[in-house]
Image (cartoon, rainbow, N blue to C red):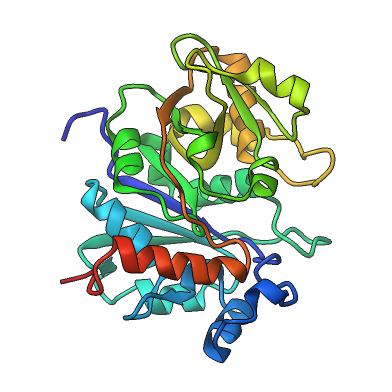
């Protein structure tokens, strides 16, 4: 293995899935009773999709394995039993992948987890070998491609993220407008992230190709470099959570040109709400084989 390649993927699966469990809308009325039950009861990454009813995370692992990853770390909420039942086999391997677990505990006095930066910090603390390696981290409810996993695995940069062309994401304009924009220098290194920019502010964030770039929460980190910024990550002033983008920006401020944005134009299917189930089912039927693990 090239010393700059990573073989480890950390999947953040400890969220509360509150939007998925929200009340049914008219657009979601075609879900089957079984799909409704799963949407209301399961973590999003464990919702079964496709003709053979693989969990969404199986498709993520399918792509990661084909991109060359060998180690998977699941960061779950305090109820890790459904994930362990699905992915922790007696020999700690799932479809040829080495599987590890970490649990994000909820601080006393809070009802929800403390955010993604806290989740990643707890994963590193519980799987201490992550401090001494490079790893990719991503959400559990986005279906990232083989290409995106490969680009991060093979980059020479010490830290990186996929810098998606906003126009390539096949989401509604309302959803896209909620995405934070990223600003990079002429060589692609991260300089800033802006949430919910106005139309006037947005124009300052076009890259050299005239594109608006967004992050879909897939990053590559050198463990020893990101760790202090996760440990010292402040709470977001509105959401009151510790978030990876905040830690990322603090790292960039302390170490300019330490985080490379890798440009990519493609769609990233996701599973945010019940209405996404139907869309993702259609996508999987078109782009994936019925039998993933042959």
The residue under the point 63% across, 19% down is 205
Q: Position of residue 218 (x, y in %)?
A: 47, 42
Q: Position of residue 92 (x, y in %)?
A: 29, 68
Q: Position of residue 224 (x, y in %)?
A: 46, 30
Q: Nearer the viewer, residue 168 or 247?
A: 168
User: Number of callouts in the render?
Assistant: 0
Task: Name the side, left or right, on which 132 lies relative to 44.
Answer: left
The residue under the point 37% across, 35% down is 132
Q: Nearer the viewer, residue 282 or 227?
A: 282
The residue under the point 24% across, 68% down is 289
Quadrant into which the N terminus falls: top left
Image vertical order of residue 281 relative to residue 197, above or below = below
Quadrant into which the C terminus falls: bottom left
The residue under the point 51% across, 48% down is 170
User: From this viewpoint, which residue is outermost toward the top?
Assistant: 186
Task: Name the side, left or right, on which 187 lies relative to 20.
Answer: left
Q: Nearer the viewer, residue 82 or 78?
A: 82
Task: Name the side, left or right, on which 259 lies relative to 212.
Answer: left
Image vertical order of residue 47 relative to residue 118, above or below = below
Q: Position of residue 207 (x, y in %)?
A: 53, 17
Image vertical order of residue 293 relative to residue 136, above or below = below
Q: Is residue 55 visible?
A: yes
Q: Is residue 99 visible?
A: no
Which quarter of the figure has residue 85? bottom left
């Amino acid at each position: 293995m090239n010393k700059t390649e990573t073989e480890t993927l950390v999947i953040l699966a400890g969220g509360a899935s509150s939007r998925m469990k929200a009340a049914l809308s008219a657009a979601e009325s075609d879900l089957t009773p079984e799909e409704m039950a799963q949407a209301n009861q399961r973590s999003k990454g464990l919702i079964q999709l496709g003709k053979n009813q693989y969990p969404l995370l199986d498709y993520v692992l399918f792509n990661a394995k084909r991109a060359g990853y060998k180690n998977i770390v699941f960061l779950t909420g305090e109820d890790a039993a459904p994930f362990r039942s699905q992915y922790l086999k007696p020999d700690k391997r799932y479809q040829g992948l080495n599987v590890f677990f970490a649990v994000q505990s909820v601080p006393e006095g809070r009802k929800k987890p403390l955010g993604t930066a806290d989740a990643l910090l707890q994963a590193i603390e519980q799987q201490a070998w992550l401090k001494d390696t490079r790893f990719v981290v991503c959400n559990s409810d986005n279906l990232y491609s083989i290409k995106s996993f490969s680009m991060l695995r093979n980059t020479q940069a010490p830290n990186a993220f996929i810098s998606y062309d906003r126009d390539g994401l096949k989401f509604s304009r309302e959803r896209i407008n909620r995405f934070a924009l990223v600003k990079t220098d002429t060589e692609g290194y991260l300089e800033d992230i802006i949430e919910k920019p106005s139309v006037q502010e947005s124009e300052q964030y076009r890259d050299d190709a005239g594109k608006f770039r967004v992050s879909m929460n897939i990053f590559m980190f050198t463990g020893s470099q990101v760790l202090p910024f996760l440990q010292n990550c402040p709470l977001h002033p509105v959401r009151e959570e510790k978030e990876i983008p905040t830690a990322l920006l603090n790292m960039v401020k302390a170490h300019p040109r330490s985080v490379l944005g890798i440009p990519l134009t493609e769609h990233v299917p996701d599973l945010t709400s019940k209405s996404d189930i139907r869309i993702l089912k259609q996508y999987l039927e078109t782009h994936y084989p019925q039998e993933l693990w042959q």
